[in-house]
């Protein structure tokens, strides 16, 4: 048997640990298992760039995979059905079809099972590849492992790496919040990753309160403990009257002498897009048609907007995204990764293609048909935990 891995999209705390867990299982099957990793995701598959992966480990050697963030085989953002983008990136030649090139590479490499570890874009691309393979009557099993710190894959209940990213983001803010004593009227804007889902922003804020906040808040009454609070949270799913919100924030800073805000990088997207269009500029988009969020800067946009009304003597914008998504998985996420990968291994042996995850529609751990997978599952702003969080922030 020959297995292959590719990791695609952004980093997440579960990538190396997923590869390690699956390699560990296959190392126990027999001595005939071979493994390769395609370098930099679907880009490596198209170019035939791959490395051989070990299939025999000591306990210490396998632990290296579990305790290391990021992906040792690298990532990229490539959509196999976007021929123009593949041409632009020199991944194919004129007249070639990316899906055909990718399928032919798997056939040439004699791959029996391909594991695609990524988010909704990765797994919808894996869907296109699997459908193409099926149309050619080729016997290759394709299994998706759902990772994204946004936790926005439908119908996946929980994506690998998301809880770790939220916990690390909370730790990041626990340090950053101490900066608000550096000015008399200080604004801290913490921008958190998330395109169309505010889940990570909200869950990071929730973890800050539940896990980090209480440890350093036993201060004498002489000090205003609200300086450590979050005073505003902004996610794409929640409608906001910006003028009313600025009035509320003006009242808060009058009392607290600082503002600590959590902004999802996908928040205010419509407003910012309109501003960009009015300025005569065009929106930058990636291969999947998504607006490139690093060209938008919602934290900067919102801080400049409220600074027109509220006077600050210092504005600090901090982004925890790369710090959080490159972390090693915490114990809870590692345990959950084992659960998902153990089930993925079982399905690989049974030649079942699909995405492995807890199906929120049934509550069962399942091998979900690729064709049922889609992205941009939003944060449920009516869930009790989120409403409690908002009530605590805006009290």
Image (tube, rainbow, N blue to C red):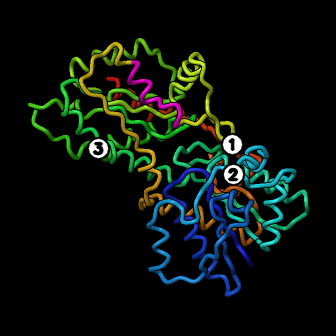
Q: Which quadrant does the N terminus fall into?
A: bottom right
Could you tell me which secondary element the residue under label 3 belongs to? helix
Would you say residue 300 sits in the magenta stretch? yes
Q: Quadrant of residue 234?
A: top left
Residue 244 to residue 145: above or below = above
Whole-percent x, y for residue 137 in the image: 91, 63
Could you tell me which residue is drawn at 55 percent across and 45 percent down?
151
Residue 171 in the figure: left or right of residue 117: left
| Rendering coords of residue 60 (x, y %) | 44, 80
> Which residue is denoted by mark 1 in the rendering?
287
What are the residue bounds of the magenta stretch? 294-305
Residue 299 percent location from the top left of the image = 42, 30
Give the number of the disc on residue 174. 3
Residue at mark 3 to residue at mark 1: CA–CA distance: 36 Å
- Look at mark 2 in the image and give the residue it sits on: 123
Going from N to C along the chain, the mark reached first, 3 or 1, is 3
Name which quarter of the figure residue 245 lies in: top left
Residue occupying the point 47% across, 81% down: 59
- The reply to whether residue 338 is in sight is no
- N-terminal label among 3 and 2: 2
Mark 3 crowd level (few <14, some 14–19, many ≥20, 10 Å Cα):
some
Q: Is residue 392 left or right of residue 142?
A: left
Residue 207 in the image: above or below residue 221: below
């Amino acid at each position: 048997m020959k297995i292959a891995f590719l990791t695609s999209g952004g980093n997440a705390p579960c990538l190396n640990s997923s590869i390690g867990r699956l390699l560990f299982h296959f190392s126990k099957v027999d001595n005939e298992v071979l493994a390769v990793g395609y370098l930099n995701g679907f880009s490596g598959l198209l170019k035939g760039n791959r490395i051989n992966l070990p299939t025999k480990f000591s306990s210490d050697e396998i632990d290296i995979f579990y305790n290391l963030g990021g992906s040792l085989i690298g990532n990229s953002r490539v959509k196999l059905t976007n021929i123009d983008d593949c041409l632009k990136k020199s991944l194919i030649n004129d007249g070639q079809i990316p899906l055909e090139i990718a399928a032919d590479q798997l056939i040439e490499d004699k791959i029996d099972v391909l594991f695609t570890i990524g988010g909704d874009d990765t797994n919808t691309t894996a869907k296109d590849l699997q459908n193409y393979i099926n149309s050619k009557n080729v016997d290759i099993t394709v299994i998706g492992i759902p990772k994204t710190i946004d936790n926005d894959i439908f119908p996946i209940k929980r994506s690998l790496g998301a809880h770790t990213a939220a916990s690390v983001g909370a730790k990041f803010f626990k340090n950053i919040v101490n900066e608000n004593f550096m000015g008399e009227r200080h604004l801290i804007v913490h921008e958190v990753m998330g395109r169309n889902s505010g889940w990570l922003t909200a869950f990071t804020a929730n973890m800050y309160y539940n896990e980090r906040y209480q440890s350093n808040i036993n201060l004498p009454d002489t000090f205003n403990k609200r300086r450590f609070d979050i005073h505003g949270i902004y996610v794409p799913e929640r409608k906001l009257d910006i003028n009313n919100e600025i009035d509320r924030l003006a009242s808060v800073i009058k009392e607290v002498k600082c503002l600590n805000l959590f902004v999802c990088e996908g928040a205010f997207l419509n407003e910012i897009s309109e501003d960009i269009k009015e300025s005569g500029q065009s929106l930058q988009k990636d291969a999947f048609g998504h607006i490139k969020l690093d060209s938008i800067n919602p934290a900067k946009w919102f801080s400049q907007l409220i600074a027109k009304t509220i006077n600050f003597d210092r504005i600090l914008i901090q982004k925890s995204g790369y710090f959080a998504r490159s972390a090693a998985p915490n114990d809870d996420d590692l345990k959950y990764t084992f659960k998902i990968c153990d089930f993925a291994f079982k399905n690989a042996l049974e030649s079942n293609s699909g995405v492995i995850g807890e199906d929120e529609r049934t509550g069962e751990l399942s091998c979900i048909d690729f064709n049922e997978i889609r992205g941009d599952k939003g944060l449920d702003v009516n869930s009790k935990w989120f409403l409690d969080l908002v009530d605590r922030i805006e009290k």
